Amino acid sequence: MVTVKHFVFRTLGQAKRLIVILFGFTILAVGVVMIVLPGPAVVVIPLGLAILATEFIWARKLLAAVKGRIERMKKGINNRTTSL
């Protein structure tokens, strides 16, 4: 038998998940808009993915790929500056 306590906790969990999803997609959308408009899209997009990664595996995988790309870019910049 489902108790009221179980129902309340399940409903609060679903509400928390919905808030995280809405907030994550909003941040991600703002980051995508910042690709065209002035703003720190390179920072905002991974932030949105990190928020979504708390709920979605696809976002976790995409965030790992973005982190790898950022690390490769850092190494390329460091190699370029040390060779000058």
Image (tube, grey):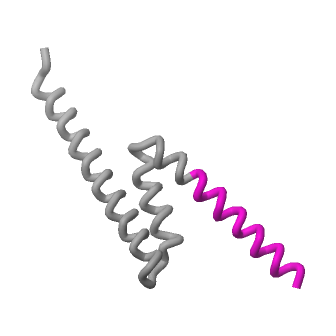
Q: Residue 24: percent from the left, percent from the top?
A: 36, 57
Q: Residue 70: percent from the left, percent from the top?
A: 64, 64
Q: Residue furthest left?
A: 4
Q: Nearer the viewer, residue 33 or 45?
A: 33
Characterize the magenta stretch by its predominant secondary structure: helix
For residue 62, side relative to residue 74 (left or right): left
Q: Residue at the location (36% across, 65% down)?
A: 29
In the picture, which quadrant includes the N terminus?
top left
In the picture, which quadrant includes the C terminus?
bottom right
- Residue 68 belongs to magenta span: yes
Placement of 17 over or under 50, stated as above or below: above
Span colored in magenta: 64-84
Q: Residue at the location (42% across, 70% down)?
A: 31
Q: Residue furthest top?
A: 1
Placement of 73 over or under 2, stated as above or below: below
Q: Residue at the location (39% across, 44% down)?
A: 55
